[in-house]
Image (spheres, rainbow, N blue to C red):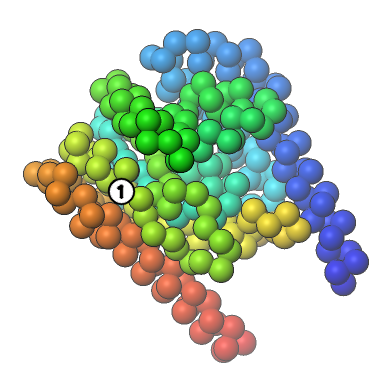
Amino acid sequence: MAFFKYPFWLLYRIWFYILVAIPIIIMFPLLIISISREEWYPYFFKLARIWSKFILIGMGFGYKITREETPDPDKSYMFVANHTSMADIMLMLVTVKNPFVFVGKQELAKIPLFGFFYKRTCILVDRSSSKSRQAVFLRAQRRLKQGVSICIFPEGGVPDEHILLDEFKDGAFRLAINHQIPIVPITFYDNKKRFSYTFFSGSPGKMRAKVHQFIPTNGLATVDTKGLNDKARTLIWDELMTSQITKKSHSNQE
């Protein structure tokens, strides 16, 4: 069986990068125009959502999104989710309709073609540099003032695959408090199984996302950052644990 799996996984990974490139090439003139001015970013965001849907469908990922609350299109938010897969970016773009800017690691800017637009539309951070982390706050503040939301994966990177949910960094929550914008916790259930960072792994199938009740920051101060962090992480942790228990229960019944 393994003899057949490894060639499939190899081709599946290659197919992913082909799918990443195709819509970028097709929409290249529109993408270039949409990034030429910051105030045109919402148009780029719409194109990015089309790109994401194309990839998810092309990979055989049937996505299902449930919402306990829906963001107001005229307000800014801090979107946070667990981070387990390269497909997290695509699923986040499909899940959220409000234009937002990713805060992400600068290494992704090295990916051919994708990196060209990534470094021009996202807020890049070198997590080993305190100066870089400080610059993130300044850029994020400017984008929030323009009415755009922010998305951060607060684990600060992709944890080892045996870790269900790593500790959250405080940056997203401090920024949300500073601007008094709600936290929107989102749980991705299946991305690790569908398309993890382990090269020889992955398969078509369902990808589920859940948008939880928003966590308000009204009246909170910087001293409340850790408590807000814990509240958001606990919510996602409990959801992942409940999903695992339900899955094991169904397996035992079968």
Q: Quadrant of the C terminus?
A: bottom right
Q: Residue at x 20, y 41 (%)?
A: 177
Residue that sits furthest to the right in the current view: 3
Vertical comparison of 134 with 152: above or below: above
Q: Quadrant of residue 127?
A: top left
In depth, the one of 219 and 43 nearer the eye is 219
Q: Amino acid at mark 1?
A: Asp
- Considering the numbered disc 1 on the image, is that residue within a helix, a strand or a loop? loop
Q: Is 100 left, or right, of 4 in this rendering? A: left
Q: Residue at x 47, y 31 (%)?
A: 124
Q: Position of residue 219 (x, y in %)?
A: 9, 44
Q: Position of residue 24 (x, y in %)?
A: 66, 25
Q: How many numbered circles does the render carry?
A: 1
Q: Residue at x 25, y 42 (%)?
A: 174
Q: Is 212 left, or right, of 182 in this rendering? A: right
Q: Residue at x 19, y 36 (%)?
A: 178
Vertical comparison of 219 with 243: above or below: above
In depth, the one of 62 and 224 nearer the eye is 224
Q: Quadrant of residue 132?
A: top left
Count residues near mark 1 (Cα–Cα under 10 Å), then give few for <14, some for 14-19, many for 20+.
some
Q: Position of residue 234 (x, y in %)?
A: 31, 64
Q: Is 216 left, or right, of 197 in this rendering? A: left
Q: Position of residue 191 (x, y in %)?
A: 57, 56
Question: Do we see residue 220 in this rendering?
Answer: yes
